Amino acid sequence: MSHSGDSHSLVTAEEGYDTEFRSYPDDAWYSVQLLLEGERSEKLRVKYDEFPAESDNVFLADNFKSEDELHDFLGRFRKVSVQLQDPNCSKVVKGMRVCASDSFAAGEVLFYDAIVDDVLRKKHSNLNGQEECECIFLLFWLHGPNVGNLTNKGVADICLLQDSELHPKLIYFMEISMQNIVKALPDFVSGTTSDDLVCNIVARLRETKGRPLSGSFRQGKYAQPSLSEVWPPRGGNCDNRQDTDVGGDKKLYVILVQNLEKDLSSSAVSKFIHEQTSIATQVYIFPSLPWEPYSNGVIMMDYKKDVEQLFGFLQSPNQFTVSSNGRSSIRITACRPLVATEKLSLNDQWTLMVKSPNKLLNRREGGFSRELKVVSSGTEEYKKAKELRDLFLQFIDHQKRLYKRLCTEEKIIS
């Protein structure tokens, strides 16, 4: 049993850096080791591989004020992913999510998630009896400095994602954090004890985090040292996780989405976004009239950089996010493309209204499986989705022009 400072560490010296963490300052993935510290294990120390101890981050369970905030934090951890090997390059296909290295000034190498936009297959060479992949992978970056851009990469830059459950230390830290969050609530649900509430919330967090967030680091290759330059040194407590706007007012960032399936659930949309981009969101779908063929909704986030990343993902010309109810008897089911039409920020007054469950319908139960998926350029599904998207945009434009004309006529009459 090893000890760290004056804490009671629950990590053994034999345990390695089997986890990766998406850091707050640069949003890049780093190989880390997790240590629980304190009398109640109320501190989580994140140690970065091949970085000095001054770069460690310490997170306190008391600093998490809501379930959503804790969920976003947990989503930044995942099992260390696997380096793509030359003979196995066929595992990487168009539309697949990977993590890849990206190079910057002064030799800095950082890891970010990306979608494989296309693959140019080439014949492999043989060097000293070793197979070498010559294929080129066109990546669409999901976050980082090149978010929304396309870049050519080789097999040496690609890492494969691994499915994994929450790390046991994260589960323990999550339980401690949730106990503090529940204690701070004004009152508990009638007939429910605080322990019951904690268990229910922890079970839900474990279920949502258990899905893959995509992978990153390979064994033996690490991001070049830059973390210590951007993160507060000497083990500073990391409680400044929120974006801060000028003037100190916290804003809510929103993307308006249209053309949703009428029985699509809010939870299905939020889950899909988290799996594709690792972004934590709240989704509200507005009620629609019986004769309307689709629904509209809003996707809400706390971070400005997240709304930029997600808007770029939803509006990428190389793919569409589509929903399909799967109830058609024909071989290729019709797909409805989700259309992101606008992004905006809301002040405190609007934030309170939008987040109020009495104002909006937060539809949680979905009506069908396989509710959302990504279709890539070059497929029949993409071609059909593009046709439907263009028709929908024409319809919306017609509605706007009709509304403008009616407003003009009303002014003339008055």
Image (cartoon, rainbow, N blue to C red):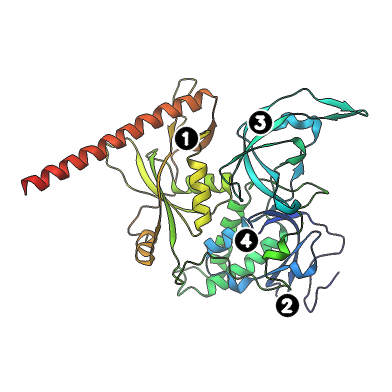
Whichever of labels 3 and 4 marks the residue nearer the N terminus, that label is 4
Q: Residues within 10 Å of mark 1 (few under 14, many from 20)?
A: many
| Badge 3 element | loop
Q: Residue furthest front?
A: 106
Q: Which residue is mark 1?
A: 322
Q: Which residue is mark 3?
A: 93
| Badge 1 element | strand
Label 3 amino acid? Val
Q: Residues within 10 Å of mark 2 (few under 14, many from 20)?
A: few
Q: CA distance from mark 1 to mark 3?
A: 19 Å
**Apparent side of residue 260 relative to residue 155 in the rendered image (left or right):** left
Q: Which mark is residue 24?
A: 4
Whichever of labels 1 and 3 marks the residue nearer the N terminus, that label is 3
Q: Which residue is mark 2?
A: 39
Closer mark to the observer between disc 1 and disc 3: 3
Q: CA distance from mark 3 to mark 2?
A: 48 Å
Q: Residue furthest top?
A: 330
